[in-house]
Amino acid sequence: MLGRVNHVAIAVPDLVAATASYRDTLGAHVSQAQALPEHGVTVVFVELPNTKIELLEPLGADSPIAAFLAKNPGGGMHHICYEVDDILAARDQLASGGARVLGGGEPKIGAHGKPVLFLHPKDFYGTLIELEQV
Amino acid sequence: MLGRVNHVAIAVPDLVAATASYRDTLGAHVSQAQALPEHGVTVVFVELPNTKIELLEPLGADSPIAAFLAKNPGGGMHHICYEVDDILAARDQLASGGARVLGGGEPKIGAHGKPVLFLHPKDFYGTLIELEQV
């Protein structure tokens, strides 16, 4: 079921400073910042040869990463996104295996304009998993 | 400086159960478990088309992931490993940029038999970064 690692997301309290750190200290290519108010985040992509890192900063009052940053004020690894061919088939297979699909199990359109689902981190050893149909 | 994401490491309290979860529930190809007593871990690789996930379980009394699991008993994302061409040049560039290189700054031979260094997570927004010369 799991395909490529589409991205690893890192929540940060200061996107400008984190972007400078990846660009200047670590020498990586970084994108312009994109505000995604419908997702409650501002995002910068760190482009690597085989995948990308998403730096996420909360945007707005109901950001989905606000609670994570309250618990981890300095930032931290937030989730891993894997590509799948068929998100509904993946969901049904996971649910039949006992995994909890967040948000009622209906895919939403994610930050890349593709259908996504999130799986409960307690079912996967503390890792929040995003599935994205590509 | 940063090249490919070589792996994302996830610390787990029960490697047999976590391996079964990635293989059977998530449908990924997983390796045999390898005990690496000199590194204080037992490791299983989840092989994906563009990178890999390393599932790590503590091995022995002085495992470097024991403290992480004491703080995160259910497991969690532990570090990201990036490939670099020249680990000594990378180290010197990072140190001149003010980043703290762990373990005195001398590369060690990592779990893949290649020279590695770790960077202080507080300098990179809560993410423990491993650099591996490939």
Image (cartoon, coloured by chain):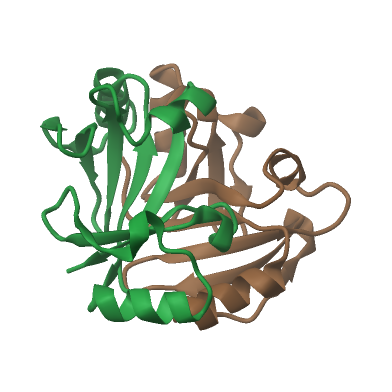
Chain colours: A green, B brown
Which residue, as the protein is rendered here, is positioned at the far front? A104
> What residue lies at 57% left-to-right and 74% top-to-bottom?
B21
* Relative depth, front residue between B15 and A124: A124
The quadrant where residue B5 appears = bottom left
Is residue B59 positioned above or below B79 on the image?
below
**Image coordinates for residue B114, horizontal then vertical, percent:** 54, 58
> What residue lies at 21% left-to-right and 35% top-to-bottom?
A43
Q: Is residue B38 left or right of A106 when viewed as pictured?
A: right
Where does the C terminus of chain A fall, quadrant-wise? Answer: bottom left
* Relative depth, front residue between A7 and A40: A40
The quadrant where residue A11 appears = top left
> What residue lies at 15% left-to-right and 32% top-to-bottom?
A37
Q: Is residue A28 visible?
A: yes
**Image coordinates for residue B59, horizontal then vertical, percent:** 80, 59
**Image coordinates for residue B53, horizontal then vertical, percent:** 48, 63
Which residue, as the protein is rendered here, is positioned at the far right? B61
Is residue A2 positioned above or below B112 on the image?
below
Is residue A61 positioned above or below B70 on the image?
above
Numbered label tally: 0
Is residue B97 positioned above or below A108 on the image?
above
**Image coordinates for residue B105, horizontal then vertical, percent:** 59, 31
* Relative depth, front residue between A25 and A107: A107
Q: Is residue B43 left or right of A121 when viewed as pictured?
A: right
> What residue lies at 79% left-to-right and 62% top-to-bottom?
B37
Q: Is residue B113 visible?
A: no
Where does the N terminus of chain A fall, quadrant-wise? Answer: bottom left
Q: Is residue A26 left or right of A124 when viewed as pictured?
A: left
